[in-house]
Image (cartoon, grey):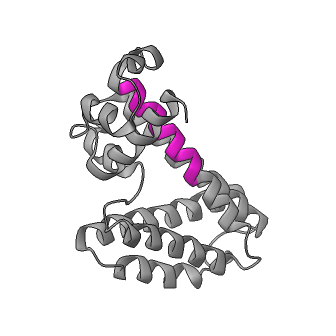
Amino acid sequence: MSSRDAFIDTTAQLLRRQGYASTGLSEIVARSGAPKGSLYFHFPGGKEQLALAAMQRAGEQLRDAIAAILASSDDLGEALARLLDALAAGLERSGYRDGCPIATVALELASDSEALRDGACSAFDSWLEPLERRLTAEGLDAPAARRRALHVLSAIEGALILARTTRELAPLEAVREELRALSPAASCTRR
């Protein structure tokens, strides 16, 4: 792995677990195993530039996972249940330290750093895209697919925050069951 990749991956993990303010450059360098001198070579903009790169990578990885899971079943409710299962397994495996890869920073800095807020918005928007595509393929018109995708993502994000806080999977399990029953046609406009 290149030093650049080591810095990005380490930063993504630390941001996910402890947020931006609690993540220092010295800790990133120590945990990454990459030479300190290469940090500013790769990221002349410092911590904020590195955090943005880490958020972008984490966002892309989750977007790709969402798309793959949604494509894994012809039944939308089953695909969404699989997505919740994967998120719950990751959260539990991490000892409830690894929730959403973006939310910790978004909640911490949305009103303080326009660049990091924009990075969080880009990640969230990229997660909505595969949801909207699937809902449109299920027959919803674009505005209805957007609303339903926002509903789904908001429920998942809220459940991740609650599960991480309570150290229980019950919020994710509840959302899983509600989304499993999701019918694209229910209360939305069809094309």
In magenta segment, residue 54: yes
Look at the image and tell me whether residue 135 can be seen.
no
Q: Is residue 53 above or below residue 191?
A: above
Point out residue 187 in the picture as x, y percentages from the top left corner.
60, 76
Image point 66% across, 56% down: which residue? 130
Image point 28% across, 29% down: which residue? 25
Residue lying at the far left of the rendered structure: 22
Is 113 displayed left or right of 67 in the figure? Answer: left
Is 21 displayed left or right of 34 in the figure? Answer: left
* Occupied quadrant, residue 183: bottom right
User: For the C terminus, which image quadrant?
Assistant: bottom right
User: For the N terminus, which image quadrant?
Assistant: top right
Q: In terms of depth relative to the viewer, which is nearer, 61 or 78? A: 61
Look at the image and tell me whether residue 18 can be seen.
yes
Image point 72% across, 80% down: which residue? 75
| Magenta extent | 48-62
Point out residue 136 in the picture as x, y percentages from the top left corner.
74, 62
In magenta segment, residue 110: no
